[in-house]
Amino acid sequence: MSKSNLKLRQSLLATCMTTFVCMQASLSADVSSATKSDAAKSDAANSAAVKSVAVKSAASKPNSTAAAASPPPFKVAGTVSRTLQTVTGINFLASFVAGQAAKTVLKKKLGGDVKVKVKLYSFTDLLSGKVKAVDCSLAGSNIKGVNVGHVNASTSQPIWLDLHDKRHIQLKTPVLVSVKASLTPEEISAALKSEKVGNSLRGLNLDLPGLGAQQLQVVNPKVEFIEDNVCIQALLKAEGADDSTGVPLKITGKLKLKGDDRVEIADLKVEGSDIIEPEKFANFAEELLNPLIDLKRMDRKDHAFRLSSLNVGQGGLTSEGRLIIAPKNPPVAAGAGVSPINGSPGIAGVSQKTE
């Protein structure tokens, strides 16, 4: 080996060792500082985050620029440390590894094609469970047996995770997620046949003279879209009855979003060989069917979903909404057992928990 090559290698080795020592010192200082600060500000940060989520949930078009500029509800690494970690490539590597880890978990639970991009403040903050933002894309995935079509989800605020139990990672502060979804007619037909979606639909109760209240079922639905109308061909029968006793129907109408939590069908038209007066039966069926979907029935203490738009076209259905995810066991400050908004615990500003 020549002397010039030996000197060059020695110089590169010294540079790498110096960078590594600086990184170790910076990381140690950041972890120590963040731990002390977070222990003192945990309750205040969580309270501020809940209020922030409630305000953003009420707004129809949240200001993403202002949200990006607002400081996180926790202490992050210093500017020098974050710059050093970015220049040395540690942040890029940590972001890639975190994204792949999240992708593996989601793919195992949901299946389909999953893509995840994780944005970090720094590697130091990632070790403390602090993430700047997450973008996720799903295609052909299933949630509890229901095909969700194509879904894009992105957070609009920082995420703070509790990493003490690696097997049960939980949130420390609520998170607002913007969701965009699209489904084809085939995917909608498959979803309507699932038990979960069927249970979320409003029960069809019909009072018959001498027989009392009868529960009706819509079975074997097939969906197609004609311009902005949805056409459903199905069989209407009494609950538990044989399919041969059912009445075949063709229902055509417009899907409309009422408020941000209900999907209804309007301008209903009913066709069927066994229907004597289809106009009167259409009015009757519209009262029975609406609302088709009531999102409040799906609310839980730690999550809730609301729609901001719903569009029907020849290619299927597209929608936009917001999902609020809250800690399952949030820390409760003294005298603050109930949220001041709507007087309900759990997620602020959405709705009360539905049992």
Image (cartoon, rainbow, N blue to C red):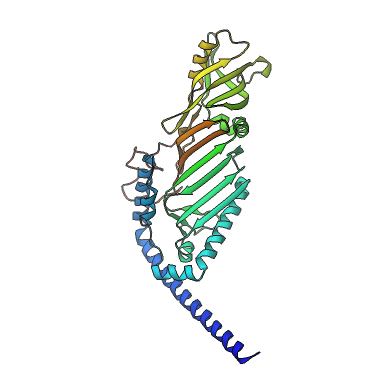
Q: Residue furthest bottom?
A: 3
Please tell me in which quadrant of the rendered image residue 337 appears.
top left
Q: Is residue 288 left or right of residue 272?
A: left
Going 52% across and 31% down the picture, which residue do you hit?
312
Residue 353, image x, y percentages: 43, 37
Q: Residue sitting at 59 percent across and 15 percent down?
A: 271
Residue occupying the point 47% across, 67% down: 86
Q: Nearer the viewer, residue 98 or 300?
A: 98
Please say if 320 is above or below 244.
below
Q: Looking at the rendering, which quadrant does residue 57 occupy?
A: top left
Residue 265 seen in the figure? yes
**Above or below, comparing residue 311 to residue 41 in the picture:** above
Instruction: Residue 144 in the image: state x and y as whole percent.
Output: 59, 40
| Tally of marks | 0
In the picture, measured across the screen, residue 1 lies left or right of residue 337, that is right
The x, y position of residue 42, in whole percent, is 37, 57
Q: Nearer the viewer, residue 188 or 46?
A: 188
For this view, does 86 lie left or right of residue 275? left
Q: Position of residue 289 (x, y in %)?
A: 51, 22
From this viewpoint, is residue 355 visible? no
Task: Pick the quarter of the image with the N terminus.
Answer: bottom right
Q: In this orientation, which residue lies closer to the viewer: 180 or 109?
A: 180
Up/down of 232 relative to 139, above or below = above
